[in-house]
Image (tube, helix red, strand yellow):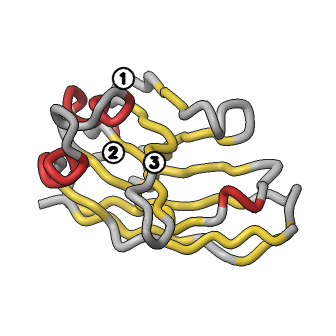
Amino acid sequence: GVLLVESGGKSVQAGESLRLSCTVSGYPTNDLHMGWFRQTPGHEGELVSTMASDGTTIYGDSVKGRFAMSRDDDKNIVYLQMDDLKPEDTAKYLCTTGPRRVLEMGWANYFHGSFARWHDALDAWGQGTQVTVSS
């Protein structure tokens, strides 16, 4: 199966930048549909960005223009470049992968309205990396 390991999270000041990495094992990144998701305690969380295997990328409204998702197929790593960070970006960031149709359901109403079913319908999740932004 696919194994995802995130890294790069740390505590920063508002306005600073960070780059998160999701190291992928078990499958080539150029064959995977990938997503970044973020969670805060007590909240369901939100999809931050998705990148299909063909490179088509979608961003959530709250990060559009500030975050950029990319991948290095030679290294099998997917990145999330985060610029102009805000305190509301504080969260645990997780990468995930699964069928494109299921992954992009996260932009609509998850899996027929169920976040839990959407979460479980995806193929793999990393453990996450914490980003904390102070004002």
Q: Is residue 27 left or right of residue 6?
A: left
Q: Which mark is residue 54?
A: 1
- Residue 39 is labelled as none
- The image's mark for residue 29 is 2
Q: Quadrant of the C terminus?
A: bottom right
Q: Residues within 10 Å of mark 2 (few under 14, many from 20)?
A: many
User: Contact, CB < 8 Å: mark 1 with mark 3?
Assistant: no
Which residue shows up at 57% across the image and 66% down it?
A: 91
Distance from the alpha carbon under mark 3 to that under mark 2: 22 Å
Marked residue nearer the N-terminal end (3 or 2): 2
| Gap between marks 1 and 3 measured at Cα | 23 Å
Task: Please provide percent x and percent y for residue 58.
Answer: 49, 27
Q: Which callout, 2 or 1, points at the residue further toward the start of the chain?
A: 2
Q: Quadrant of the N terminus?
A: bottom left
Asked if disc 3 and disc 2 are in contact, CB closer than 8 Å, the reply is no
Q: Secondary structure at mark 3?
A: strand
Per the image, the residue denoted by label 3 is 46
Q: Is residue 5 above or below residue 72?
A: below
Residue at the image position 81 percent from the left and 71 percent from the top:
134
Task: Name which residue type carries label 3.
Answer: Glu
Q: Position of residue 11 (x, y in %)?
A: 73, 77
The spot of residue 108 in percent (x, y) is 34, 27
Amino acid on which the number 1 mark rests in the picture: Asp
